[in-house]
Image (cartoon, grey):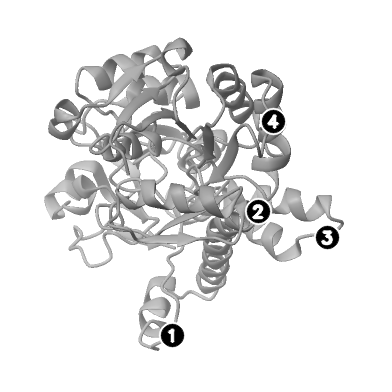
Amino acid sequence: MSSDLRIAILGLGYVGLPLAISLARRFRVVGLDVDKSRVAEIHDGHDRTGEVDDAILRSSTLTTVSDPAAIADLDIYIITVPTPIDADNKPDLKYLSDASTMVGRAMKAGTVVVYESTVYPGVTEDYCGPILERESGLTCGSDFFLGYSPERINPGDREHTLERVTKVVAGQTPEVAERLGEIYGTVNNGNIFLARDIKTAEAAKVIENAQRDINIAFINEVAVICSRMGLSSQDVLEAARTKWNFLNFQPGLVGGHCIGVDPYYLAHCARSLGHEPAVILSGRKINEAMGGLVAKSILDTLHSAFVGQARTRILVLGLTFKENVPDLRNTKVVDVVTCLASNGCDVEVHDPLASRDEAKSIHGIDLRASLDGLGPYDCVVGAVPHREYCEFEEASFSKLVRPGGLIADIKGMWRQSKLPDGIRYWSL
């Protein structure tokens, strides 16, 4: 495989930047993002997502640009833009359309265009292909070819990195698939699975996260049932996990750019084929409701102690969609905050990793800059198990929670912690 191969990566977020850095070790790579501030930040050697170490970024040969003119006439285009849902939970392909239009205007004959964005089966060939044809004047399948390789980036995961996971690859023809397999194989030492075709690879991707969503929904429903029986779901799960084939899922809030979104893509596809996806949407319904259910449980527990109190002061710890990442996309902690506030509580939020500007602009939440001097509160909600919070000691709780107050531990991160006398504890 020639090192002179010229590759463009469109989208330099959680997926695109690690891929671009890895491929740039072997090939000539240009990374394009329409966010000029993001391009400038990467150029200066910093990745706000924390997925790529600054030292690695500074030593990379990757070229970063925001001008589409810089990606003209290259050999391979890899599109890694977001595929969100709209207000009606239907697929929003705007970013995919914009990126395809951009590539169509830049590409030459002989180009291969690869999509990594999560879609339902058929989008690459039936939706994106025609856009590329329209903008380029070329014919798909003869003048240029399509590929699909679903991303498997797990934000904050240092074990299942791009270099260590199996990469699924598909091409419009067997020859294209083999070529793409060789290119991606330079990243992960040839750990490649060649899917039968593009639609198969698209389907494989979209069911991966739908499966996780359903499994978490089951555990969330179990947690609700346990709560009404006066049982700790954590204790129940701890016992159940001793069985060798019990699936180890945890109850909690399901957000982020994949698990809370991808099932709707699969559901959309199913409905277009005349099938009502009952299991998939049932799982989504349960997980979407968890923020409100958690808030209600907290309010019910608080009510028994603070009857007649004018305002209940609550501190929520963590706003990102998962632990140890700054990612605020589709975080369901917002649902908990909103529900508590709408029930008359004074709610403050702290997160050591989230951007204060993004929290304000995206969710309308003013993050507290520090825990110093805060409290005491009637209730502290452990919403996201960031390392900083997991390391709390008895003195940490004494400063933040007033005597008789409540610690609401959504993810059970303080289950084994020593708590001050007189402070109550609740968990899913």
Which label belongs to residue 245? Answer: 1
In-front residue for pair 126/224: 126
Callout 3 environment at 10 Å: few (<14), some (14 to 19), or many (20+)? Answer: few
Callout 1 environment at 10 Å: few (<14), some (14 to 19), or many (20+)? Answer: few
Identify residue for label 3. Answer: 275
- Above or below 274: residue 147: above
Relative placement, left or right, of 189 versus 199 is left
Q: Which residue occupies 17% across, 51% down?
A: 392
Tell me the CA gap for discs 4 and 1.
Answer: 50 Å
* Label 2 secondary element: helix
Three-letter amino acid code at disc 1?
Asn
Identify residue for label 4. Answer: 139
Three-letter amino acid code at disc 3?
His
Q: Earlier in the sequence, mark 4 or mark 3?
A: 4
Three-letter amino acid code at disc 4?
Thr
- Above or below 99: residue 242: below
Q: Percent x, y for residue 145?
A: 59, 38
Foreground mark, 3 or 1, reads: 3
Three-letter amino acid code at disc 2?
Lys
* Label 4 secondary element: loop
Q: Earlier in the sequence, mark 2 or mark 3?
A: 2
Tell me the CA gap for discs 3 and 1.
Answer: 31 Å
Identify residue for label 2. Answer: 199
Q: Earlier in the sequence, mark 2 or mark 1?
A: 2
Tell me the CA gap for discs 2 and 3.
Answer: 18 Å
